[in-house]
Image (tube, rainbow, N blue to C red):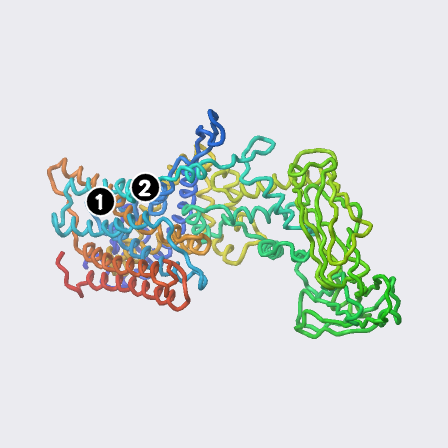
Amino acid sequence: MSTEYANLTTVSCQRFKCSGRGLILPFGTEACMSIQLRAVLYFIFLLYLFLGIAIIADIFMSSIETITSRKQKIRYPDPGEKDKYLTVEVQLWNATVANLTLMALGSSSPEILLSIIEIVGNRFEAGELGPGTIVGSAAYNLLMICALCISSIKAPETRRIKLYNVFLVTSFFGFFAYIWLFIVLSVISKDVVDLWEAIITFLMFPLVVILAYLAEKNFFISKEINMEEEERTLILTPPEVDETGNQRVFRKEDLLQFLRDLGQSTSLSLEDKAQLFAAKLSESMPRSRMQYRIEGARMLAGGKSLFPNLPGKLQEIYHAVEERSPIENGQRRRIPEEIELQPKLEFSAVIYAVLEREQKVDVMVKRTGPIDVNVRFRLDTIDGTATAGEDYEKLSEEFKMESGQQEKKITIHVIDDNQWEPDETFFVKLSLPEGEEKHAKVGSKTIALVTIINDDDPGFIQFEEPITLVKESVGKAEIKVARINGADGRVTVHYRTKDIDATARKDYQPVDSELIFEHGEISKVIAIPIVDDLEAEKDESFAVELYDSTGGAQIGKNAKTVVTIINDDDYKTMANKMASLVQVDMDKLSVTKTTWGQKFREAMNVNGGDIETAKVGHYIGHTLAFFWKVLFAFVPPTSIAGGWLTFFVSLLFIAILTAVVGDVAAIFGCLVGLKDSITAISFVALGTSLPDTFASMIAAKNSKTADDAIGNVTGSNSVNVFLGLGLPWLVAAIYWESKNLPFTVKAGDLSFSVLVFSVCCIIGMVVLTLRRFLGVFGKAELGGPTIPKYICSIFFVILWIAYLTLSGLQAYGHIKWQS
């Protein structure tokens, strides 16, 4: 102690505590600082370095996503036509191979590089920080990430592992890797790693990849290959291209269908509609583990999300479109065009019909927007062919809708005069009393038509209009059929389509069916699908005719209607413009098409420049990460050299930061009195695993399976040992073999930590297996009923705490262990 501080308050400017622990650090100016201040500064610096590693890992993963998403064109025999070939695009990288090689390297690069740098920096002598981080990271990934993913899914939803054969292979090696580590250090050659052991450890890495690939292909299960299924998987509809020849990530038909579902929302700009469709596309596209990992890192740094974030108004409309039901009873569910700031009143329907003998009709006034205030309104009846006092009782009155009330029913009395007469109509007008305009407003449905139906005859059935005009882009032509001058009893009528100059199946879908009017029903809608071929052509027509009525009903004078399909070039021009905007929006979400200018814009702006949807957390993360984001914007973008240049430059940055992390962690542990083995399994392992934590939670919530959330944990854990220890061990063993000396690796704390983790691993895997097959857990690895899922999560957390506690007690001599 004579050369260091005698106590925590002594300051020496000559020789200071922990001065020999790092390769690069400490700085000489630290000599005049107190130990407490140095410990705090090193802890803050360690956290800041973890943030930097998360950000450069985001860029590293983007390069891997670019590399592994590459496709190649191949010629494949056309199953539909002999002696012809199809040109199809197939992925160059198999998903399982990508996950266990580049993906695992990207996810675990800090831990792997820390182990390599530590051995090389220590002149090929083994240290405790690198191996300890690998074991501690494995424990955190298996136990804590599983705990968070299990509980993050809303009950009673579940997520099951789909590629279970692959999971079994990687789980076995994820456990065996650490048992092998224990055997090498404590059984075969105690405290020594022989060259053959290092070679076997390293070669197990490609062995895991090969076996996982074979398991994915069901190589170990006798199963006849379904060639038709293989062809369906391979031969996809060729992608569309835009006017410049670039491929689109969507098809024009999908865009047009979305516009039909959206309806005529006049308050939305073309850019708004493009954002909505881009959000729908993004949600439906399959996600890779790498994309979830990138998203996790960007959450920490307040960066641009890979998932579209819609403003509040568009978010409400988007959910309405997604939840919207098909046409029911001739009406579509309303899509909100704006968020109401005032209560808005309007009729629930604008057409009402009543049989004369019922002697009353109920009209409904509904309220949208705020419902926590009282609202006054008035109704006034207006004569049509029906006369007030003779056919109905006049109404001119104010009404009140109470707080919390969303609908109010108003009854208007109808006079039954027992005389036959044709159907008669009158109107009901909705308005606001004087002074109420300050507190409420009226919607578009302020006039309702009421039809008093003569109920003594079956009536006549006819089309409401002899001519119907529809745009080619309408999707379906909706043709109204009316029952007039009577509604007594159940009647039917047949209808069919006939070509004029439009061609069935080319321009529209032919129909030949039957309409049924129940007693009292007076209106029906015939829906005929219109084919939009997106080609400029003249207007075309077809006819729809009624025939063969039953139940005493007669066919009226409008027995046929001519439907004219109008070529709507303006609509198609708008659709083409919108398609271009959608492609731009999708390119903004892509990590494979970035440019240098785009990288700097995103680095300099919060939430990647999307200020409208930025939250407080984005501003905090952006402020803290600003230095790192601007620095790493100098890394070449993924659009250069197929992503490989980005790969190597970002890997270099990660190596530099990891070397600094090794120094900072070692000095911090020394300053606060922690052994390297404990610093590694706690602080360093936790810091390097934070982006993976966010990635797995995002994947658990957004993916349909558990593969991307926890299925890759076991594979990553095995790769950490076989590559993260196998590679530096191999290099060091070769070095010492050349000097005819053994490569010494003290088992010590590491072997005990590995043994405790192995026990926890077995218990954890048993719990995951039970969750998959027991109904009480929902028969799935993640989610399920509320109480069982939280019990499992708490149990995994307890296992992780037990691992840390037991490892710490052994490291400080409270548990006697002879390795």
In the rendered structure, find residue 131 and report the number of the disc placed on it.
none
Can residue 404 be seen?
yes
For marks 1 and 2, the one nearer the N-term is 1
Q: Nearer the viewer, mark 1 or mark 2?
A: 2
Is 340 positioned to the left or the right of 121 in the image?
A: right
Can residue 656 be seen?
no
Local SS, label 2: helix
Residue in view at x 57 percent, y 30 percent: 245
**Which of the 4 image quarters holds residue 13?**
bottom left
Residue in view at x 56 percent, y 54 percent: 613
**Which of the 4 image quarters holds residue 393?**
bottom right
Residue in view at x 19 percent, y 41 percent: 200
Q: Nearer the viewer, residue 207 or 647?
A: 207
What amino acid is labelled 2 in the image? Answer: Tyr
In the rendered structure, find residue 122 and report the number of the disc placed on it.
1
Pick the quarter of the image with the C terminus.
Answer: bottom left
Residue with the mark numbered 2 = 213
Gap between marks 1 and 2 measured at Cα: 37 Å
**Which of the 4 image quarters holds residue 575?**
top right
